Image: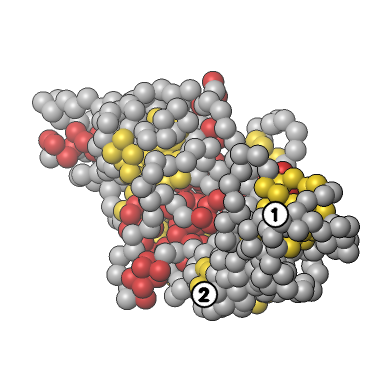
Amino acid sequence: MTDTGAGHGTAGHHPDHEVHVDRVDLEFDDALAIANDRSGTGNGTGTGNGTGTSTGASGSRSAGRGRGVGSSRSADGDGRPPGGEVDTGSRANSPSGDPAPSDHRRHHRPAPTPWPEARDVAARAVGGPLPSVVRALGAAVGEMLAEPVLALTDLPSFDASAMDGWAVAGPGPWRIAADTGGGILAGHDEPAPLPDGRAVRIATGARVPPGTTGVLRSEHGEVSERGHGRDGAEAAGAAWLRVGPGRGPVAPGQDIRPRGQECRSGDRLLPAGALVTPAVLGLAAAAGFDELSTVPRPRVEILVLGDELLRAGLPRDGRIRDALGPMLGPWLYALGAEVLATRHLRDDADALHAAVTASAAELVVTTGGTAHGPVDHVHPVLRRIGATLLVDGVAVRPGHPMLLARLGPGRHLVGLPGNPLAAVSGLLTLAEPLLRVLSGRAPAATARRQRHRTPTALPSTALPLTEAVQGHPYDTRLVPVSLAEDPGRAAPLRFTGPAMLRGVATADGLAVVLPGGAGRGDRVEVLRLPWSRTTLPVGAPGFPGPLGTPGLPGSTGSTGSTGSRLPGSPEMPGGAL
């Protein structure tokens, strides 16, 4: 289900305590809450209107709860205080104002989880990486090594020529025997020893014959049909090799790759937890491996919910295109997941229940339906299944109605809001930390902390802002930023409303702006996106290798008009959900 906008309304406040609130991604109730927090007053009589279908928005943060009409099916649209009763199931009132049906229930909603704590809960939700598997080399790319890779042989396994030329023994000149034919080629058995004063043609990668002093490159030598050896005697029927003009004598070991130059048998080539890249496959093959022990990608199934979503063509008849279905699968793959399927479901509780319970995935990701409107079925289905809610709402904008639930042993569900940028926020807040641990991408120190159930510090990058960014009074904000012009600084982008993707489509990361905002030059945490076009400054920790999953193209170039920056003035039409 896709969010359509936020409500707005009016409410009373104490006339002696006027508080100006800048335009940012917060609803009217949040502004009212600021005034009430400072004045100690407030009647909680806010009213609202909007384009969504859910009801039961809250009123003031301080004194009481008002009654109003919510603005969205996929988020509550209220500036609620931590905790409080919320509607689930039917509407709070009918359009005519009649009381709700007798089966209407109210449930206590827990306080939204602070954003850093939510990421920590997600990282600790699983006990560690999935059990290791043995993969053929070609099937292991993109996974993490479950154990160190120890060399099975010396590399190279014999002394080899590094260049095309001549293997020579002793100082020159050297006699080239007439019976050497094409010389020594790569892949031949060990050649016969090379006597002093002799030379033999040799190809790159070929075994160097015993007795060789070095290799004289083809372009550095001169061959003549007649010559004299070091003793002055002329040898008939043989060619002679000399070092060309301006070249020094052949040094011992020149242009020879000695056995064991790269590694010795038993050396640790790669640690456990390293990403298997194409280069790793090549190294493993060179070291004698046919298969590798890896942590498999966690299996993920995506359930896109909503009667209003179109899968092709232009928006029409009040329906909109599904933006999340095409986006989430590749994004989750970049985060280390194996996406089993992306399924589209209508707003039907039984269909959602059947899909969740039948899924074989370690992680089910749903979009929309995480609020408490009449067609928001995620919470009722989770209660029906007997799932355990680990995170039910996060103090972050956009994306606060996100949730994380344990379905059973080894199975979890992440519920994303329906608005596209809000869904991205939920993806990086809850899905990414969980997948990082399951797939073995968590640093070793993180894994050790997790086993002891202590706070987990996931990797991040602190960069200064090029411009000030306004903050929410209570919640963390995730703001798309570009690093294109200066990788050492984060430039806030425009078009960052919860239903917008134009800003994040050109972004390199999301800046973590704490409540109250951040000024120009302030250092903020930046969550790098998998396909970031730029590299971090030397010494910046950043996200480790798995976010650069092979197969996801990078790009270069300027930000362009679609990602033009709007310093300190984020656009938030429809509210930050």
Mark-to-mark CA distance, 2 and 1: 40 Å
Spot occupied by residue 50 in the image (x, y as percentages of width and height): 47, 32
Residue drawn at x 41%, y 22% is: 566
| SS at mark 2 in the image | loop
Residue drawn at x 41%, y 49% is: 542
User: In which quadrant of the rendered view does residue 151 lie?
Assistant: bottom right
Pointer 1 local density, CA inside 10 Å: few below 14, some 14–19, many at least 20: many
Q: Say which residue label 1 marks.
A: 173
The quadrant of the image that shows the C terminus is top left
Residue drawn at x 82%, y 49% is: 226
Spot occupied by residue 459 in the image (x, y as percentages of width and height): 39, 55
In the image, 568: left or right of 338?
A: left
Give the mark nearer the N terminus: 2 vs 1: 1
User: In which quadrant of the rendered view does residue 284 lie?
Assistant: bottom right
- Nearer the observer: mark 2 or 1; the answer is 1
Residue drawn at x 88%, y 57% is: 237
In the image, farthest residue toward the top: 561
Quick check: can you spot residue 54?
no
Pointer 2 local density, CA inside 10 Å: few below 14, some 14–19, many at least 20: some
In the image, 98: left or right of 420?
A: left
| SS at mark 1 in the image | loop
Quick check: can you spot residue 117?
yes
Judge whether 27 appears above or below 526 on screen: above
In the image, farthest residue toward the front: 232
235 or 395: which is nearer to us? 235
Rendered image: mark on residue 267: 2
Judge whether 20 appears above or below 276 on screen: above
81 or 85: which is nearer to us? 81
349 or 301: which is nearer to us? 301
Type of amino acid at the residue the image marks with label 1: Pro
Judge whether 510 appears above or below 270 on screen: above
523 or 310: which is nearer to us? 523
